[in-house]
Image (cartoon, rainbow, N blue to C red):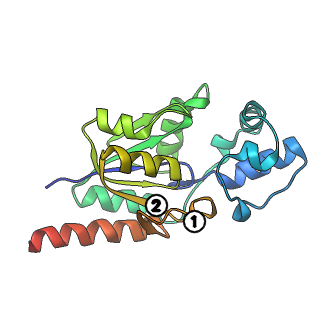
Amino acid sequence: MTYRIVFDLDDVLCNLREPMSDALAKATGKRLAWQNWTTYDLSVLYGVGLDHCLSAFLEHEVLEHAKPEPGAVDAVRVCRELGCEVQVMTARGWHPNGDALTRSWLAAHGFVIDALAVVGLHESKAAAIGAAGGADFLLDDSPRHIQEVMDAGTVVTPVVLCRPWNKHVTNASRVRSNIEFCKLVMSRMAAEVVA
């Protein structure tokens, strides 16, 4: 059986929280450590409108300054070597060049994937995954996206990558790293071989 795995990008495969935190500190004068973010709705945390946040992200080129998470390139490579189909799905549709920047960033950092889907900031990943025929795994940090795929049943195993803003998500599998996620996939594959 070939598994279809969907990886979120921001704060899963790449560290966007640090450039976003820096951009918002410069734009608002308010410095909040991302480790204390209790929500990913940064307009609430920083007391500014969403448009103000997005303008700061564009001005300070947060997408261009994001760095890969430790082990992320290896995790994607291992999943593909296991015969899995790997897709990256990101809500970078807010950026006017989100698709092109994302493709360029992935290639520049050595990520080899089977497909990329860029959805709008408020669009449903559950609907996009469902339209593509579903997935066996989704690794995401967003409580909203995890809950939506669980409600829609479009992903067999939704997995949360632990972040401060998703501590309250307890009804899904949780991992602390991309490598730990790979081990989860491998154990599932091994269990099916035995069964």
Q: Quadrant of the N terminus?
A: bottom left
In the picture provided, is 75 more to the left or to the right than 26?
Answer: left
* Upstream in sequence: badge 1 or badge 2: 2
Q: CA distance from mark 1 to mark 2?
A: 9 Å
Q: Which mark is residue 167?
A: 1
Q: Which mark is residue 47?
A: none
The x and y percentages for residue 114 are 32, 42
User: As displayed, is residue 62 above or below residue 97?
Assistant: below
The x and y percentages for residue 62 are 69, 43
* Image quadrant in which you'd find residue 186: bottom left
Q: Which residue is mark 2?
A: 160
Q: Nearer the viewer, residue 110 or 54?
A: 54
**Which residue sits furthest top?**
96
Whether residue 185 can be seen here? yes
Q: Nearer the viewer, residue 83 or 152?
A: 152
Badge 1 density bin: few <14, some 14–19, many ≥20, Cα 10 Å: some
The x and y percentages for residue 8 are 46, 49
The residue lying at 44 percent from left, 51 percent from top is: 146
In the picture provided, is 60 more to the left or to the right than 158?
Answer: right
Whether residue 142 can be seen here? no
Q: Amino acid at mark 2?
A: Val
Say which element carries label 2: strand
Say which element carries label 1: loop
Badge 2 density bin: few <14, some 14–19, many ≥20, Cα 10 Å: many
The residue lying at 84 percent from left, 49 percent from top is: 25
Q: Amino acid at mark 1?
A: Lys
User: As displayed, is residue 21 above or below residue 133?
Assistant: below
The x and y percentages for residue 117 are 41, 35
Q: Nearer the viewer, mark 1 or mark 2?
A: 1
The residue lying at 46 percent from left, 60 percent from top is: 160
**Which residue sits furthest left?**
195
